[in-house]
Image (cartoon, helix red, strand yellow):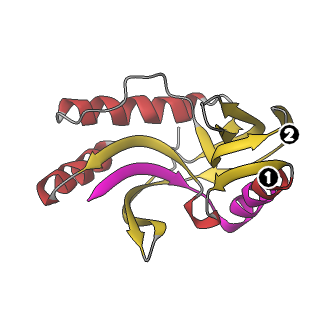
Amino acid sequence: MRLFIAINFNADTKDRLQALSDELRKVSSRGRYSLRENLHITLAFLGECGAERIATVKSVMNEIVFSPFNLQIDRIGRFNRNGGDIWWAGVRKNSTLSELHQNLSARLREQNFCLEARKFSPHITLGREIVTKAQQRQIEPFGETISRVDLMKSERINGKLTYTAIYDKEGRAVFR
C-alpha cells in the first residue's frame, strides 16, 4: 500500500481551500486540481509499505505525544516547475506543527523508513501543472484546531485518486 501521514481538515476549512482552488482555476489556462476530499498537509510520505511496516507506523504514531494546536492558512504560493507550477495554500509558521513533524520523522527514521531530506514546508497542494498569470499573495488567515493525525492510504479507484484514513492518532490536552 502507498502510505503517508497527514493532517486532514474539517468541512469548513476544506470549503475555504476549495474556494481558493476555484479562484485559481478561473484565472488559469491549464492545470490538474486537487479534489476537495484530498486536501491535507503531508507530515511524512512513506511510499509503498507492507502489512508489517504498517504495524510499525501505527506503533510510531502511538508514541507521538502532542496537544491540540491552532493552525492558520495565510497565503497562496507556488513551486516553480517546467510544464506548469504546483500551487499551494501556505501555513503560518507554527512551532507545535514543526515539532510534531520533527518527532514523527525522527521516530520513523529510527525504524528505517526513508523520508524526504528536504526542509519541511507545510502546505496544502491546490493543483499541479498549473499555467496561470495569478500571483502569489497573502490571504485573510483562516484555519482550525488540529487534534489528530491520520495514516493515509493512496490509491486509484475507477481512475480517481483517493486518500483514505486507515489509522489515526489523537492529540491530548495537557494540563499544567
Return the mark for residue 139.
2
Tell us which disc is closer to us: 2 or 1.
1
Nearer-N-terminus badge (2/1) = 1
Name the residue nearer the viewer: 61 or 75: 75
Quadrant placement of the N terminus: bottom left
Circle 1 SS class: helix
Residue 17 magenta-drawn? yes
Q: Quarter-wise, where is residue 105 in the image?
A: top left
Q: How many numbered markers are drawn?
A: 2
Q: Is residue 47 visible?
A: yes
Identity of the amino acid at label 1?
A: Leu
Please, is residue 37 above or below residue 171 in the view? below
Q: Position of residue 80 (x, y in %)?
A: 64, 28
Identity of the amino acid at label 2?
A: Ile
Q: Which residue is mark 1?
A: 20
Q: Quarter-wise, where is residue 19 in the image?
A: bottom right
Q: Quarter-wise, where is residue 36 in the image?
A: bottom right
Q: Which residues are magenta?
A: 1-20
Which residue extends farthest left?
A: 52
Q: Position of residue 26 (x, y in %)?
A: 85, 55
Please, is residue 98 above or below residue 18 in the view? above
Q: Residue at x 39, y 58 (%)?
A: 152
Residue 98 magenta-drawn? no
The 10 Å Cα crowd at callout 1, few under 14, some 14 to 19, many 20 or more, is some
Q: Position of residue 114 (x, y in %)?
A: 25, 33
Circle 2 SS class: strand
Name the residue nearer the viewer: 88 or 63: 88
Q: Residue at x 43, y 77 (%)?
A: 158
Q: Residue at x 53, y 37 (%)?
A: 176
Q: Using the numbered discs, state the Cα–Cα distance from disc 2 to disc 1 in whole angstroms.
A: 10 Å
> Does the CB distance between marks 2 and 1 fall below 8 Å?
yes
Q: Residue at x 61, y 37 (%)?
A: 83
